[in-house]
Amino acid sequence: MNINVRFGMGLVPSNGLPRISVMLASGATVDDLLEYLHAQYPASPLSAAVPVIGGEHVPRSASLSDGQEVAFLLPIAGG
């Protein structure tokens, strides 16, 4: 299945592309996507990123659907 990935500020991989498409097996989860991305872009700080689907933070165990967009954003603290 095709998953669209959007990287937030500070997470854009070394290829400089803020958006990419990734092919994963059916039934893949956000964790599976992260594993794939870590293998492709080992220097990216994705371990600190928050996954967002449809404007909602989702757990890394969330299942993905074909054509879905997953955004990875760095958490921000404010006060």
Image: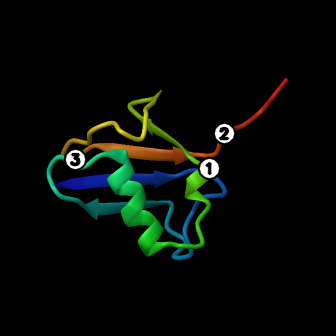
Secondary structure state at the residue bearing disc 2: loop
Measuring from the top left, give residue 49's x and y in whole percent. 57, 47
Classify residue 61 by image quadrant: top left
* Foreground label between 3 and 2: 2
Residue at point 28%, 53% (across, down): 3
Measuring from the top left, give residue 30's x and y in whole percent. 36, 46
Residue at point 46%, 45% (across, down): 71
Tell me the tag on residue 75: 2
Secondary structure state at the residue bearing disc 3: loop
Secondary structure state at the residue bearing disc 1: helix
Q: Circles 1 and 2: CB distance less than 8 Å?
A: yes
Quadrant containing the N terminus is bottom left
Q: Which residue is mark 1?
A: 48
Measuring from the top left, give residue 38's x and y in whole percent. 47, 66
Residue at point 40%, 61% (across, down): 35
Q: Amino acid at mark 3?
A: Gly
> Can you name the residue that lies furthest to the right here?
79
Mark 1: few, some, or many residues within 10 Å (few <14, many ≥20)? few
- Label 3 to label 2, Cα distance in Å? 25 Å
Measuring from the top left, give residue 14's x and y in whole percent. 56, 75
* Foreground label between 1 and 2: 1
Residue at point 29%, 62% (across, down): 22
- Label 1 to label 2, Cα distance in Å? 8 Å
Residue 33, above or below 27: below
Q: Circles 1 and 3: CB distance less than 8 Å?
A: no
- Label 1 to label 3, Cα distance in Å? 24 Å
Mark 3: few, some, or many residues within 10 Å (few <14, many ≥20)? few
- Quick one: 61 or 2, which is closer to the camera? 61
